[in-house]
Amino acid sequence: MTIHYHGTPITPRSVLQTLSGRCFCVSFASPNDVTWAHEHGQSVMLDNGAFSVWKRGIKPDWEKYYDWAGHWLAYPTTWAVIPDDIEGGEAENDALLKDWPHKRGVPVWHLHESIERFERLCADYDRVCIGSSAQYQVVGSPIWHERMTQAMNAICKDGVVPVWLHMLRGLAAARFGYPFASVDSTDIARNHHIRNNALEMANIWDAIQCKPQWEIVPQQERMFA
């Protein structure tokens, strides 16, 4: 079963209320709905806001994020994304993992990082987020699929997925055949006013289920970034 986390804030509140009982993603960059999500949602994913930080070119305050996340992690069905630097190197991102002060936290592997780091994170954690970055930032592009296939081939050698994989910005990617345990997106937050029915959108997304295992895909030898 694939869990779908619907990004917030979703406005107006009357629209959000129609989604009671769903799973929600609340970003530290826009935490308006975090209390409501814990009062009415099944599970809450706390996003560190790194994507917003990257887009806005601002400096993150990770200490405030630690405090904010720590409060909500008292809920056993809530989990948090450990801080990451989308344009940072592997050493910088590994250092952020070491600074994480809570018992429960999920690291991010960026597609432009080495497959070796992905394998290491899968060995050290029971849940790993995948982030589309650098030349692979467009989810669903040919080069994105090529990199994802290489990554899945590396960690799922016998078809079994070794950890819980969460695809960031990945609701649409749930259709692509990868074995994601969970995905998130702000599609409803951004587009419900166009389609005029947030609940119908949630029903469509939540019905899309990923495969539980991976079938190795042969690839031609080439140099990967």
Image (cartoon, rainbow, N blue to C red):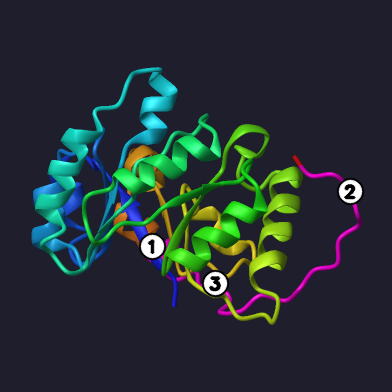
The type of residue carrying mark 1 is: His
Left or right of 41, for residue 95: right
Q: Which mark is residue 79?
A: none
Say how many tags the image has.
3
Residue neighbourhood size for the residue with mark 2, other residues' Cα within 10 Å, grouped as few (<14), some (14–19), many (≥20): few
**Image point 15% across, 38% down: which residue?**
32
Q: Which of the numbered marks, if any, corresponds to residue 4?
A: 1
Name which of mark 1 and mark 3 comes first in the sequence: 1
Q: Is residue 173 left or right of residue 184?
A: right
Q: Quadrant of residue 105?
A: bottom left
**Kind of element beneath mark 1:** strand
Distance from the alpha carbon under mark 1 to that under mark 3: 11 Å
Tell me the residue that label 2 is attached to.
222
Residue 129, x across and y down, in percent: 46, 55
Q: What residue is pinned by disc 3?
A: 210
- Amino acid type at circle 3 is Cys
Quadrant in which the C terminus is drawn: top right
Mark 3 falls on what kind of element? loop
**Quadrant where the image shows the N terminus:** bottom left
Among numbered discs 2 and 3, the one appearing first in the sequence: 3
